[in-house]
């Protein structure tokens, strides 16, 4: 019997598997016991998801973080729990460095080169942001070209120039900087904010 990768499917199929007459009685009993344990774990996970979702809805920080694409209830709740005051960081780059998403700098002969990310900082949040980056990159790649946002076009271009993992880290770092700006300045996510940037207006005029 082949069981697909799904907790619900596994819970449904285990009793049928345990009824296979070719299996010894101890094995059948073991499978039924495993199902009981998995069912209890699944129920606990459902309760945890409900608690996380409730926290994400009740926390102003989580609500604001959840406005950014790729930030779901779990990540938003984790941001609220781990970053109660974004102003503790001087800027978005410092926040990204705290998460371990900023590449290390190496200086040689007066030139600065960027190396691998440090992997220091908050591992849990970094992992969640990279998972969110994976989701947003896949959405950008599947989007119709005429409907892509400026951020999605940046992601697609980045993916074309770099390998997959480096692209994910760069997207996660971009999300971290946007998150810092939203939380530190207590602003909602605005996809068109770049159009009001002084540098953009200067380029447009010239």
Image (cartoon, rainbow, N blue to C red):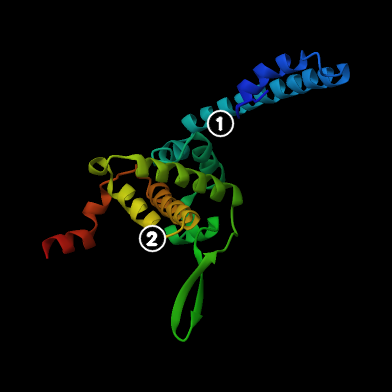
At a point 42% along the width and 50% down the height, the residue shown is 175
Label annotation for residue 52: 1
Q: Are marks 1 and 2 in contact (CB under 8 Å)?
A: no
Where disc 1 sits, the SS reads helix
Where disc 2 sits, the SS reads helix
Q: Is residue 185 visible?
A: yes
Label annotation for residue 148: none
Viewed as shown, does residue 63 lie left or right of 117? left
Task: State whether residue 44 is above or below residue 107.
Answer: above
Foreground residue, 43 or 32?
Answer: 32
Foreground residue, 158 or 102?
Answer: 158
Residue 201 at x, y percent in the picture: 17, 59
Foreground residue, 28 or 62?
Answer: 28
Viewed as shown, does residue 181 lie left or right of 85? left
Q: Quadrant of the C terminus?
A: bottom left
N-term mark: 1 or 2: 1
At a point 78% along the width and 21% down the height, the residue shown is 31
Q: Is residue 47 visible?
A: no
Mark 2 crowd level (few <14, some 14–19, many ≥20, 10 Å Cα) = few
For mark 2, what is the residue? Answer: 161
Q: Which residue is situated farthest in the bottom direction here?
A: 109
């Amino acid at each position: 019997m082949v069981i697909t990768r799904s907790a619900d499917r596994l819970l449904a199929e285990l009793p049928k598997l345990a009824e296979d007459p070719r299996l010894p009685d101890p094995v059948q009993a073991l499978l039924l016991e495993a199902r009981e344990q998995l069912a209890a774990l699944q129920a606990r996970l459902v309760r945890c998801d409900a608690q996380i979702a409730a926290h994400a809805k009740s926390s102003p920080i989580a609500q604001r973080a959840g406005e950014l694409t790729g930030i779901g209830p779990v990540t938003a709740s984790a941001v609220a729990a781990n970053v109660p005051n974004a102003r503790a960081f001087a800027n978005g780059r410092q926040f990204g460095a705290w998460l371990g998403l900023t590449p290390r700098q190496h200086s040689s002969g007066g030139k600065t080169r960027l190396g691998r990310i440090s992997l220091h900082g908050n591992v849990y949040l970094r992992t969640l942001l990279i998972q969110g980056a994976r989701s947003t990159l896949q959405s950008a790649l599947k989007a119709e070209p005429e409907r892509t946002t400026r951020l999605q076009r940046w992601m697609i271009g980045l993916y074309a120039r770099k390998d997959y993992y480096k692209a994910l880290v760069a997207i996660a770092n971009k999300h971290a900087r946007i998150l810092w700006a939203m939380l530190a300045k207590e602003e909602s996510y605005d996809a068109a904010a770049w159009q009001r940037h002084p540098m953009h207006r200067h380029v447009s005029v010239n």
